[in-house]
Amino acid sequence: MIHLIRGFKDILPGEVELWQYIERTAIDLFENFGFREIRVPIMERTELFSRSIGEDTDIVEKEMYTFPDRKGEFITLRPEATASVVRSYIQQKLYTTDPVQKLYTIGPMFRRERPQKGRYRQFYQIDAEIFGSQSPLADAQLIFMLVSLFIKLSVTDATVHINSLGCPECRPKFREALSGLLKQVEPQLCEDCVRRSTRNPLRVLDCKVPTCRDAIAEAPSVIDFLCPECREHFKTVTRLLDTMNVPYVLDKRLVRGLDYYTRTAFEIQTGALGAQNAIAGGGRYDSLVKTLGGPDTPAIGFAIGFDRLAEIVALSGRDFSKGPEVFIAALGKDSQARAFEWHCALSMEGISTEMDFSDRGLKGLMKRASRLKSRYVLITGEQELEQGALVLRNMATKEQVAVPVDCVVETVKSMILQ
Ligand code: HAM
């Protein structure tokens, strides 16, 4: 027997209804906020990710599924969606139709991390991006929309953590100050952080190793190094969140694991999932479109970890799986043939309908109908056909009504939709 690859998983019927519910809720909400869907490929040239996410990030250094195709060109299974959406925005010149583009995309991502609860090698993201707006209103709108989605899904254990990472003007000064401290405490740092402290010192702030956390307890705060423009931007974003009653935590340690961020960076964190506490993350990336060869375009976005969100919503115990509206229990060859016609006609009329193709008896058919959680069972046998009336049974109330054979579809439809 051939098994799944480690870190990959199946999402089975029974569970998938929860995913569909989350997806529909997100799509409805995002479209109400003016976002439109974009679908981009799951494979891209490796260079797209190494140039946007950054050579010195964990993702690019050790987590990407990269391989040469048959012609020797290096391609990568996307570890995130932002880079591909930016590539498409530039390549398809989306800015020519409207300089402001609000886009969302939902799909699988791939990172070769160590699998554990809430962490997979193929996982799914619900991603939203706004191109072409420098305004702090865009930051506030995106965070408000994200928080609203969690509220709609009744996810209560979710806190917004927010920080500003400055811009190419002010961040180097912070980096320098941080590097100074890291040199002093180097003997206390873990192996990864020693390497990071020269190549990507901001990442040390994000290290979970307790000795590293202690060593950098006195680390400077990026907020203290912001230039006046970045400071004003950040102040306005937080003021807008206050006005919209969005609670947040100012988190000077929040740095994010991708290098393209400028100014606002945020995460939604939860205590519900143990070690994997981030259910969403995002921020501004005002330089990325230009870096990848497009026009100078500010942008901001977020991605929700769909798997993690589904795990949290599932904690409510709510059953999202649905059975058919009608199960047709047909006894005997003749009624099976008629039932098959009604099954097709009702399904075409928008009534989800199921029937059994075997020659099971009534007891077996009723058993199957209740296993499928059917709301109604339409019973037809030779006798019913002869008498010209079928029986429609409400499985919850056990109430039974007669349905004339010559207008089954109309009668069942009107009874179910009333
Ligand atoms: P990220 O923080 O790398 O950001 O990922 C966003 C979310 O994806 C995380 O908060 C987490 O919930 C989920 N996630 C990441 N890795 C895994 C994994 N191995 N298994 C399960 N879930 C995972 C980004 O990807 C950025 N592209 C977000 C963004 C969009 N920034 C601007 N626009």
Image (cartoon, rainbow, N blue to C red):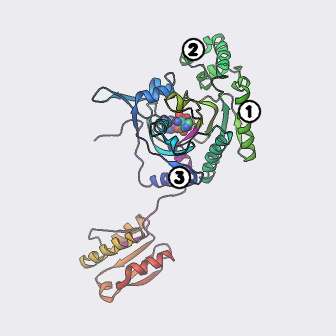
Q: Quadrant of the N terminus?
A: top left
On screen, residue 162 versus residue 363, left or right, reads: right
Q: Which mark is residue 27?
A: 3
- Residue drawn 59% across the image and 30% down it: 261
Q: Secondary structure at mark 2?
A: helix
Report whether the residue tagged 3 is closer than 8 Å to ligand 1. no
Percent from the top left, x then y, of residue 374? 43, 68
Percent from the top left, x then y, of residue 8? 40, 39
> Which of marks 3 and 1 precedes in the sequence?
3
On screen, residue 375 versus residue 158, left or right, reads: left
Q: Which mark is residue 198?
A: 2
Asked if residue 357 shows in the view, the reply is yes
Q: Which mark is residue 255?
A: none
The residue identified by callout 1 is 232
Report whether the residue tagged 1 is closer than 8 Å to ligand 1. no
Please state which amino acid type lies under the numbered disc 2: Thr
Q: Tell me how far mark 2 sits from mark 1, CA to CA.
A: 30 Å
On screen, residue 382 versus residue 237, left or right, reads: left
Res 10 → quadrant: top left
- Residue drawn 51% across the image and 58% down it: 319
> Which of marks 3 and 2 precedes in the sequence?
3
> Is 254 located above or below residue 100 in the figure?
above
Q: Tell me how far mark 1 sits from mark 3, CA to CA.
A: 32 Å
- Residue drawn 56% across the image and 32% down it: 296
> Is 335 located above or below residue 13 in the figure?
below
Q: Are marks 1 and 3 in contact (CB under 8 Å)?
A: no
The residue segment tinted magenta is: 300-328
Q: Which is more foreground, mark 1 or mark 3? A: 1
Please state which amino acid type lies under the numbered disc 1: Glu
